[in-house]
Amino acid sequence: MKLLFVGCTLLVLSSVSAVAGTRYLSGLTSLKYNDTDSILMGSGQTVTIDDATGWVTEGRLAPNTTQWAKYGPGRTAIFLQNSMIKFSGGYASDGYLYDMGGVQSLSYGSAHTAAFLERSHINFAGGYVSGGYVSESSSWLPYNSAYGLVHVNSAAKVEFTPGADGTGALAKAVLVSATWLYYGPGRNAQFRASGVFTSFSGGYVSQGVLETTTWLTTRTGVVQVAASTICTFSGGYYTP
């Protein structure tokens, strides 16, 4: 506030301070999240704005309104009313899925889709799903085109690696039961489930917990590894 005397009159000048990168919304407000698309944000909140573009990057969605947003070119999802959402590069990157009668079918790669649970947290990267909760109907997922599918626990978040070409690949999941999986060409082991995450890279297991004592192949030979050991693999070999 500034005080200014004009003759014998005292004028009070009010000023509003703004924090760079934020904007306070006193009412429902439609904001752009890319050059062509907008989304309705809720009132009574401070949203985050990209100063360079003027696009909203984080905030709470409006209540009582169905909100569609793009998570990649030509790919959209419906987000939960009155929930937090984030945008990056002009697309949704983090949010909560709206109730669409149980699931929404979304792409985690150009060649792969899965059904993701309603009201669940979901992440996007590179224009595809990078993490989410799949439905039981989508709980069999490919990890290697030559070795078929792996059964993942739908109660745990599944992570995906879209890849440079967007083909999509399983990156991290909890197994439904102890499962024999390949960590390299022709080399497999039985990995534990029960809340333990198993990681994948390049179509093979990159980290997991052994269910049973197993002989594993290293780059120089074979070693016996005890059950319950957390094992790391690289290039198709066990790396002690």
Image (tube, helix red, strand yellow):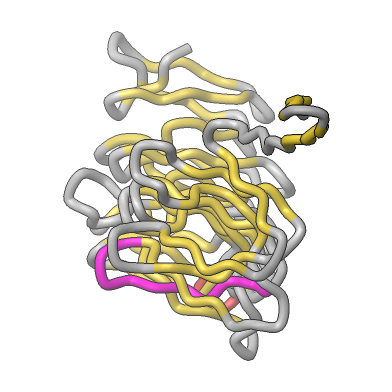
Q: Quadrant of residue 142?
A: bottom left
Between residues 212 and 170, which one lies in front from this camera angle?
170
Between residues 77 and 132, which one lies in front from this camera angle?
77
- Is 206 placed left or right of 172 in the picture? left
Q: Is residue 6 visible?
A: yes
- Residue at image point 52% right, 68% down: 30
- Residue at image point 66% right, 29% down: 227
Which span is picked out in magenta?
72-81
Q: Is residue 126 magenta?
A: no
- Is 98 placed left or right of 147 in the picture? right
- Is 180 placed left or right of 46 in the picture? left
Q: Is 200 above or below relative to 63?
A: above
Q: Which residue lies furthest to the left in this view?
A: 165
| x and y percentages locating residue 91 in the rendered image | 38, 56
Q: In which quarter of the image is the N terminus?
A: top right
Q: Is residue 2 visible?
A: no
Q: Quadrant of residue 80?
A: bottom right
- Is 166 placed left or right of 75 in the picture? left
